[in-house]
Image (cartoon, grey):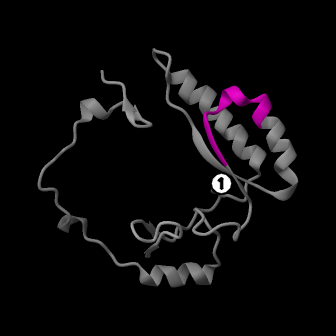
Amino acid sequence: MVEDEYFSPHDTAVISAPQKAPEGSITRSESAMDMLERVKTVTSSWVDGGHQRGQNSHNVSATVTIKDDEWETVGEWMWENRDSYNGLSVLPFSDHSYKQAPFEDCTEEEYNEMLKSLKAINLDNVSEEEDQTNLSGELACAGGSCEIF
């Protein structure tokens, strides 16, 4: 499902695709504090723990949806743990706070209706005329810059 982007309809499109979370998945209904603690764990255990050399490392970026009663606690956590993250987007936990929000909830009926509009794509019919991939130059790329080994 493709639609014009709300703020730039003349040159930008938004693609929506229904996704069903497997049983037991962590979804956006998770508390903001649980999400932030996972960000902190990934940063310390995976990003910082796996950093080999140099000043710069990769970072964890995340979108945290915050319920009305969580704002103060989240603000305190963010200040106390400011060395544990680089990029956090914080949004109010709502289905209608802004247009074209990521990961919107839907009913099972809405999900099934969206599935009907999807068409199967045979990837055998997708071909690349020229391969522009340079794996050795793309191994450590992030944020518009690359560390080349």
**Residue 65 screen position, x and y as percent:** 71, 54
The range drawn in magenta is: 78-89
| The one of 6 and 119 positioned closer to us in this rendering | 6
Q: Residue at x 16, y 47 (%)?
A: 131
Left or right of 134 in this view: 87: right
Q: Quadrant of the C terminus?
A: top left
Q: Is residue 143 magenta?
A: no
| The one of 119 and 90 positioned closer to us in this rendering | 90
Q: Is residue 21 above or below residue 18?
A: above
Q: Residue at x 85, y 43 (%)?
A: 73
Left or right of 121 in this view: 14: right
**Residue 20 screen position, x and y as percent:** 55, 67
Residue type for callout 1: Ile
**Residue 129 screen position, x and y as percent:** 11, 56
Q: Mark 1: give few (<14), some (14-19) or many (20+) Cα within 10 Å.
A: few
| The one of 62 and 4 positioned closer to us in this rendering | 4
**Residue 137 screen position, x and y as percent:** 27, 31
Q: In which quarter of the image is the N terminus?
A: bottom left
For label 1, the residue is 26
Q: Is mark 1 on a helix, strand or loop?
A: loop
Q: In which quarter of the image is residue 103?
A: bottom right
Left or right of 77 in this view: 102: left
Left or right of 70 in this view: 141: left
What number of labels is visible?
Answer: 1
Q: Is residue 82 above or below residue 19?
A: above
Q: Which residue is drawn at 74% across and 45% down?
A: 34
Q: Is residue 97 above or below residue 28?
A: below
